[in-house]
Image: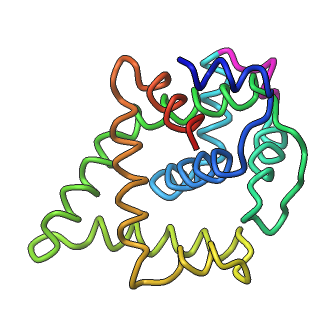
Amino acid sequence: MLTITIFSKRKRISRESIQRLDLLLLALETIDLNGAESLYSLSGKLNLNEVLPNKVTIWKLRNNNPMRNSFNNNNIKLSEFNALIKLTAEMAKILYPYIRQILQSRDDLIRNPKPWNEFKNRYIELISERFNTNSMKVKRLLDPSCNDDVFIKIILTLALCISEDGFLNLRSTLLNY
């Protein structure tokens, strides 16, 4: 609770929080091939149209991630950040069967490597397309020797969003970055 109180006084969201949220959204796009369209459609169902009126708005907000090729240094509002978190948590609930399958595959690479490998390859492909590959953070994400741990944390974070308090848990986690 203290973090949220301090946060609301500053009215600034850390770069790390924005980066982490964008990586979670990118992971959802990796799982759902129509990710951008699905996110926009879901935003309407969640009555987030006032904050996220169209796909371009969602894209512009995500471009606050400094790792992106199309980085824009705009101050993202708390209401916009919360809307993206809500969208992430709800989309994770919808995609949970696939998320679980990817996690199970990662735990049993000998018998069932396909879901994990497909996720990882597509995620790396999307990162390479959309992020600044000259950045050291992005290079680490693309480095096969260390990216498994990061990718597992991202998938586990999405899996934990399916609880009743998924939105609140995710928001608390992201605001503590």
Q: Taking 2 as reference, is 134 left or right?
A: right
Q: Taking 155 as reference, is 1 left or right?
A: right
Quadrant of image for the C terminus:
top right
Q: Residue at x 42, y 26 (%)?
A: 166
Residue 140 percent coordinates (x, y) = 54, 78
The answer to which of 28 and 164 lies nearer the viewer is 164
Q: Residue at x 74, y 75 (%)?
A: 132
**Most common SS among magenta residues:** loop
- Magenta-drawn segment: 47-53
Q: Residue at x 63, y 74 (%)?
A: 138
Residue 109 percent coordinates (x, y) = 17, 73
Magenta region includes residue 154: no
Quarter of image, res 145: bottom left
Q: Taking 122 as reference, is 68 left or right?
A: right
Quarter of image, res 87: top right
Residue 40 percent coordinates (x, y) = 68, 35
Magenta region includes residue 52: yes
